[in-house]
Image (cartoon, grey):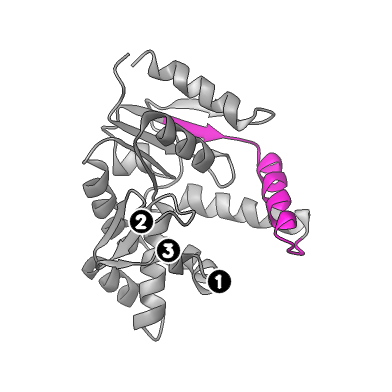
Amino acid sequence: MRIPCIVAIDGPAASGKSTLAEKLADFLGYLYFDTGVMYRAVTLAALRELDTLDEAMVTGLAERIDIDVRPPSVQDGRKYDVLMNGEDVTWQIRCPEVDANVSQVSAYPGVRRAMTAQQRRIGQRGRVVMVGRDIGTVVLPEADLKIYLDASVEERARRRYLEVQQRGENISYQSILSSMKKRDQIDSTREVAPLRPADDAVILNSDGVTAEEVLEQVKALLADC
C-alpha cells in the first residue's frame, strides 16, 4: 500500500467530512487541515482592522495577510495551530462575531482566490488531509486521493440539531434545516469554486453510517492507492 501524500475531502455542511478528515489524519500521522479556518481568520482580521465588510476592502486584506496552519503546539484541545501574520489565533477565530460573519466573507470571490493560493502552499508540503468544499476541484486537483462525503440534507440537519441541543442552544430543527438548504444553495451555485465532486473523486454517503464505518471505507481505498 502506497500511502497518499495529499488527501482531499470535500462535501456539504455536516456530512461528517471534518470528523472523517480528523480520524484519517490521526491514522496516517498527517496534518489535519480544515480549510474553513482560513476564512475564519480573514473574517477575524476584517473585524479587527476594517470598519466595514465591504467586498473590495476585505479582499484587499485577504491578499495582504499571511495565514498558516501547523500541527498543534499546545495541548489545549486544539487540532492544529492557526497563525495569522505569526499570531496564534486558533481560538479567537471561534468567537461569536466570526461565526456571524464568516459566511459573507467566504462568499467573496477575491477572498476565495487569495485563500486558495495559501491553501495550496500549505497542502503542497504533503502529508496532509485537507477538508473543505473545493479541495479536490480547485485547491489541490493533484491530490492523491479525493473523497466527496455526502448525506441527505435532512440527516445533516438532524446531526446539527443534536449538536446545538448538547450545547444548550434553543434552535429548532426546522430552522436548522432551512438554513442548511440555503447554505447548500449558496455553496453549489456560487461563481467561484462551487461545491461539487471532482471528476475523479470517490463519492461516499454517510446516511445511516457511523463515523468509524466511513473511516474503514476510506482505509480500504488507501489499500488500492
Q: Earlier in the sequence, mark 2 or mark 1?
A: 2
Q: Secondary structure at mark 3?
A: helix
Tag 3: Cα neighbours inside 10 Å, few (<14), some, or many (≥20)? many
Q: CA distance from mark 2 to mark 1?
A: 19 Å
Give me the residue at 49% from left, 47% from top.
188
Using the image, tell me which numbered label, if any, was put on residue 23.
none
Residue 54 in sight here:
no
Q: CA distance from mark 1 to mark 3?
A: 11 Å
| Viewer-closest of 50 and 124 | 124
The residue singled out by tag 2 in the image is 81
Tag 1: Cα neighbours inside 10 Å, few (<14), some, or many (≥20)? few
Residues rendered magenta in the picture = 147-171
Magenta span has 167? yes
Q: Amino acid at mark 2?
A: Asp
The residue singled out by tag 1 in the image is 96
Q: Label 2 near label 3: C-beta < 8 Å?
A: no
Q: Secondary structure at mark 2?
A: strand
Q: Amino acid at mark 1?
A: Pro
